[in-house]
Image: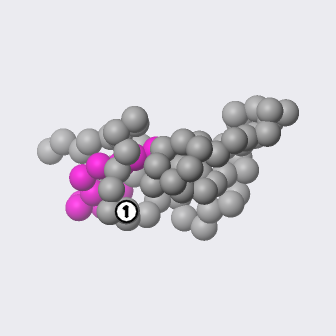
């Protein structure tokens, strides 16, 4: 998260994705996503990473469950 926060000058916060994080939920935002129980969390993370075209993007909101706040 720190690398992303300092990747360009005007980044203020960085939020992580989760299976149940409102706008930051994956694979479907706004709902509690249920992962197959036969997959490990590392396998889920690899699947999510393969399914996205960018590793970071600008969003209108953050999610406080896991947020990096940049400090100057």
Can residue 24 be seen from the camera position used here? no
Residue 65: % across, % down? 40, 35
Colour pattern of the rendering: one colour
Judge by depth and name the residue closer to the eye, 72 or 68: 68
Residue 11: % across, % down? 27, 57
Say left or right for 5 vs 39.
left
Q: Give the answer, above or below, for where 11 lies relative to 70.
A: below
User: Which residue position holds label 1?
Assistant: 59
Q: Which residue lies furthest to the left in this view?
A: 72
Question: In the structure shown, which secondary structural element does the residue marked by tag 1 occupy?
Answer: loop
Q: Is residue 15 highlighted in magenta?
A: yes
| Residue span colored magenta | 7-17
Pointer 1: residues within 10 angstroms few (<14), some, or many (20+)? few
The N terminus is located in which quarter?
A: top left
Chief secondary structure of the magenta portion: loop
Judge by depth and name the residue closer to the eye, 30 or 68: 30
Q: Residue at x 48, y 44 (%)?
A: 21
């Amino acid at each position: 998260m720190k690398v992303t926060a300092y990747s360009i000058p005007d980044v203020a916060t960085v939020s992580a994705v989760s299976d149940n994080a409102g706008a930051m939920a994956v694979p479907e935002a706004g709902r509690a996503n249920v992962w197959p129980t036969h997959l490990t969390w590392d396998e889920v993370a690899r699947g999510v990473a393969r399914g996205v075209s960018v590793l970071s993007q600008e969003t209108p909101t953050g999610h406080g469950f896991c947020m990096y706040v940049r400090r100057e």
